[in-house]
Every structure is written in C-alpha cells, then in structure tokens.
Image: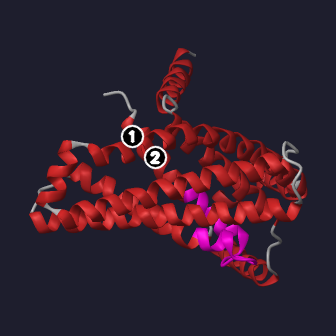
Amino acid sequence: MLKPIKKLDAFISHLNRLMHTRESHDALILFLAYAAHFLATALETPIPETLKSWIFECSKILLRIVPPRLLSLLSTSKYPPAIRSLSANKTLVAERFRALSDILDDWQIITRLWGLLATWTDAKEFLTSFTSENESEEKKSNPRRYLVQKAMRATYIMGLFGYYGLENLAWLTRRGVFKWTDKTESKLMVWSLKAWGVYVMSEMAQLLYDRSESKRTGEEQDEETRAEWRRKFVQVLLYGPLTIHWIREGGLFPETIASFLAAYTEFITVRGLWKETAEI
C-alpha cells in the first residue's frame, strides 16, 4: 500500500520541480493543451472506408494466426466491451477533450502574457549592452561575429514581443475586453503567428550559427551539449512547417497530423525538462 503512495509522492514532487520556472510551466501547459487538442481532433475525425477495410482484412488474418488459447482470453477479457463503449461515446469523449483543450489554451495564453515582462527585461539588457565596455572590445576584435549575434538577438526579441503582444490582444478581444470585430481579432492572431515565425527563424539561425562557430574554432562539446542542440534543432525544425500551417488558410496538413506534430514538438521540451529536474 505504501509503495504506490511513495511513487505518487515522487511523481508529484518531480512535477513540482519541473514547474518551478515560468518557462517550464509554460512548456508543460502548452504540451497538455496540444495533446488534448490532438485527442479531440483524432476522435472527431471519421475513419476512412479504405482504412476500415484494411483493418478488417488484417483482423481476419490475425484471427487465423493467433493461438486459440490467446484468442479465447481476448474474447472473454474486459477490453472489448470497453473498446466498444469508447467507440459508441467517441463524440462525447471528443467534446470533453475539446473543452479541456480550450481551458488549457486560455491558461497558457495568460501565462505568456507575463512572458512580456521577461521579454521587456531582455530588450532592456540588449539595448544597454551597446554602451558596455566589453561589448566595445568585442566589436573591435570581431566585428562580423558581433553584428551577426546582435542581429539574431534583435530578431529574437522582436519576434517574441510581436507574438506575445498580438496574441494577447487577440485573446482579450475574443473575451470581450476589447470591443473589436472578429475580423480584427483574426488579423491580430495571424500577425502574432507571423511574429512567432520570425522567432522560430531566429532560433534556427542561432542554432546553425553556434554549430558553425563550434566547428570553425574546433571547440569540443560533451555529449549532453550535443544532445541539447539536437533536441532544440528538431523542435525548431518541426515548428517551421507548423507555423506555415497555422498561418495559411486551409493549412498544409490535415488537422490531426498538425495537432500531433505540435504535441510531439512540445513533448520533446517537456521530456528534456523532466530529465533535467530528476533527483540524482
């Protein structure tokens, strides 16, 4: 009896450590929102007749090759009724996941509203850095590197400012705080996604530039640093087509695929944070 309680306590303690910072909290809520959206979308999407036919044919083949004893166990188990019940109530379950997704979506947008404060601090530090003596020395010693890094940093900050600010204006309009039209709300959301695209491009540029500089200087990196770079690169690479999908009318992919990719992209972040916050 105590063992399950200890496991539950360890899980909750680990989750509490993971959510200790705003960035980690935001990543977890975003992952849960995307996951709920994916489940709702998948349940709402009708199964194509071709796929149904393929599943039926596969089941007939499996029935011929599965041992009789295993077949009898499966036929008398509690799982088939549960599966049939889920299939019959698929629409109801989808509605519940959709409602959960909407709540989590509001939650993470509100969380990102406070992200404007951190972005403001980043912008202030960026502007004041131009008067720093260390910055002046770096500019003289390697002007090309100095300009490239400043350009990427400026793009990063402008992208985040636009994304956070415009997204929250659109959300506050949707909630009736601002009495703007639905068309204005839609435009604000599209422009916020375009600003997100700018941020994604700046992140990709920073990752590629860092890798190029490491190779040029021959800097040795440990396995943990390389793994972190690969994780961020895959995440940013997936967000590229997803951003285009969200901006483009009609999208690039079926919504089920897009929502799965979004959930998986944030899962990469949460998995990394989970490992970082594990007790040694």
- Give the quadrant of the C terminus: top left
Question: What label sits on residue 271 in the rendered view?
Answer: 2
Residue at the image point whose x is 83% and y is 54% from the top? 94
Q: Which residue is mark 1?
A: 275
Q: Is residue 86 left or right of residue 265?
A: right
Q: Secondary structure at mark 1?
A: helix
Q: Tag 1: Cα neighbours inside 10 Å, few (<14), some, or many (≥20)? A: few
Q: Mainly helix, strand or loop, the magenta region?
A: helix
Q: Quadrant of residue 216?
A: bottom left
**In the picture provided, is 132 more to the left or to the right than 161?**
left
Q: Residue furthest front?
A: 131
Where does residue 83 sit, x and y in percent of width and height? 79, 55
Q: Residue furthest top?
A: 2
Q: Amino acid at mark 2?
A: Arg
Q: Say whether marks 2 and 1 touch (CB < 8 Å).
A: yes
Residue at screen point 70% across, 68% down: 256
